[in-house]
Image (tube, rainbow, N blue to C red):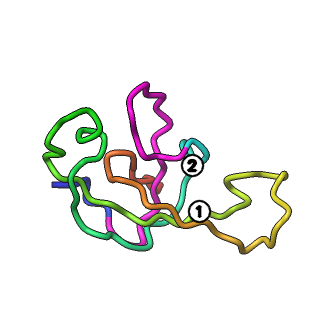
Amino acid sequence: MGLGIAEGDRVTVRADEVAHHHRTPWFVKGKSGIVRRVHGAFPNPESRAHGGTGMPERRLCQVEFRQSDLWGREYCGRPDDVLLADIFEQWLEPVRRG
């Protein structure tokens, strides 16, 4: 199970527009960050919201984003400020190096 995403990996959140329930905040879609923690596998909330079983389970990852990467020049905080977001693995794509 999973995409082989591990703690420390750089990932990009898929920018898909979907009409159904999902738990991926709009402001992180298309943005890249670092996986800081893999919480474990949980029933898929996108399936459960529509009466499904939530199977197969999906891993939930804590991803760290730089605030300035999320908000651009509009961000007035410190340059080292970060946001931590829990994102299910089906929304994450590994950033390929090279």
Q: Quadrant of residue 82?
A: bottom right
| 49, 71: nearer the viewer | 49
Image quarter of the N terminus? bottom left
Q: Earlier in the sequence, mark 2 or mark 1?
A: 2
Task: Return the x and y of residue 39 as percentages of the image width and height.
Answer: 31, 70
Question: Within the magenta stretch, is there residue 27?
Answer: no
Three-letter amino acid code of the residue under disc 2: Val
- Per the rendered image, the range of residues in magenta is 6-25
Q: Does residue 10 appear to the left or right of 83 in the view shown? A: left
Horizontal arrangement in the rendering, residue 59 relative to residue 94 (left or right): left
Residue denoted by label 1: 65
User: Which secondary structure, mark 1?
Assistant: strand
Cβ atoms at labels 2 and 1 below 8 Å apart: yes
Residue type at mark 1?
A: Phe
- The label shown at residue 28 is 2
Magenta stretch: includes residue 13: yes
Q: Picture quarter containing residue 69?
A: bottom right
